[in-house]
Image (cartoon, rainbow, N blue to C red):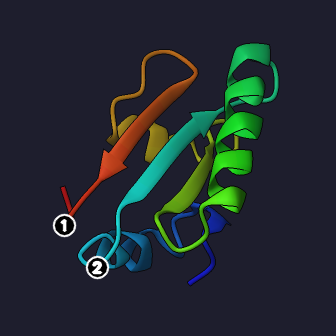
Amino acid sequence: MDNILSLTKDNIQQVVDASMQQIVVLAFWAQPQEQSVAMLHTLEQIAAQNTGRFVLAKVDCEAELEIANYFRIQSLPTTLVLDKGQ
């Protein structure tokens, strides 16, 4: 699994399963929210510099509203950590 990926309905189970072996950082963002875009770029840089330490799963809240609703995201930027599926 790549250490930086876009989270979608198609790969969410694979990402949750991956959190059993490695920490997954979920970064919720949306293009109109400048702060969320800035936070996403910072997290991408950290993930690129720390390959293998964690997986960064980017969630575009405009495209993946169902995922954002599932995690009850109320403001952006929001960052969550999955470890062992939780």
Q: In the rendering, at what x and y percent does residue 60 appear?
A: 67, 43
Q: What element carries label 1?
A: loop
- Figure quadrant of the N terminus: bottom right
Seen as rendered, the residue at the extreme bottom is 1
Which residue is the site of mark 1? 84
The residue at which mark 2 appears reads as: 21
When the figure is inspected, residue 53 is found, relative to residue 28, above or below; the finding is: below
Quadrant assignment, res 20: bottom left
Q: Quadrant of the C terminus?
A: bottom left
| Res 54 visible | yes
Task: Depth check: give the residue in front, 17 or 81.
Answer: 81
Furthest toward the front, the residue is 49
What residue appears at the point 64 percent right and 42 percent down from the top-left corner? 43
Q: Say which amino acid is labelled 1.
A: Lys
Sequence-earlier tag: 1 or 2: 2
Q: In which quarter of the image is residue 32?
A: top right
Asked if the residues shown at circle 1 and circle 2 are in contact, with their CB atoms under 8 angstroms apart, the answer is no
- Give the total of numbered labels: 2
